[in-house]
Image (cartoon, helix red, strand yellow):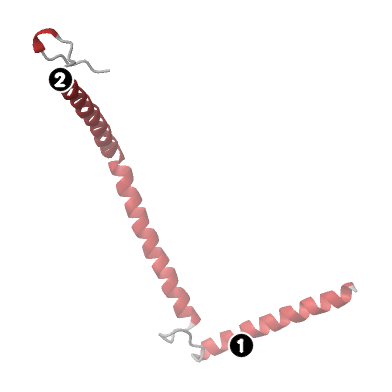
Amino acid sequence: MKLYGRFHYLNAMINSTKITLDRARLEEQGKNRIGDAGQSYRELYQSRIQQQENLSKKLRETQKLVKENHDVNLEQANMFRDLRKILAFKLKVLRTEVSGESGVPGGTNHLIMD
């Protein structure tokens, strides 16, 4: 039973190899064209490899820019966070003044931040 299975496995491998060899021969002769552009497999794979290399290069450049600007962008994000805190506190103070609950005698302004 083992030999029978092995026979079919080897037969399938031989057929697969024959098909690959036939494709290689046709491509070598220039008769194996695929797609709308009529490219050979080699040309198709070369163009896809080139596209991926270009994309990889662009991604590396983008990564470099992100790494270079990370500290500056982080500082700016912190400044915006602080600005939001200040504006939220200012809004809170204005709302309490409008409602008349300031609780500060003489209407003087005091800034207390958490």
> 101 or 42, which is in the foreground?
101
Residue at image point 15% right, 10% down: 104
> 40 or 29, which is in the foreground?
40
Amino acid type for the residue under numbered disc 1 = Asp
Amino acid type for the residue under numbered disc 2 = Glu
| Residue at which label 2 appears | 97
- Asked whether, in this view, residue 96 is left or right of residue 48, the answer is left
Task: Determine whether the residue tagged by mark 2 lies in a helix, strand or loop.
Answer: helix
Residue at image point 26% right, 33% down: 75
Q: Which disc number belongs to residue 54? A: none
Q: Is residue 31 above or below residue 94?
A: below
Extreme residue toward the right, this view: 1
Quarter holding the N terminus? Answer: bottom right
Task: Determine whether the residue tagged by mark 1 lies in a helix, strand or loop.
Answer: helix
Q: Is residue 79 above or below residue 98?
A: below
> 109 or 3, which is in the foreground?
109
Q: Looking at the picture, how far across and down is residue 48, in whole percent?
A: 43, 71
Q: Quadrant of residue 57?
A: bottom left
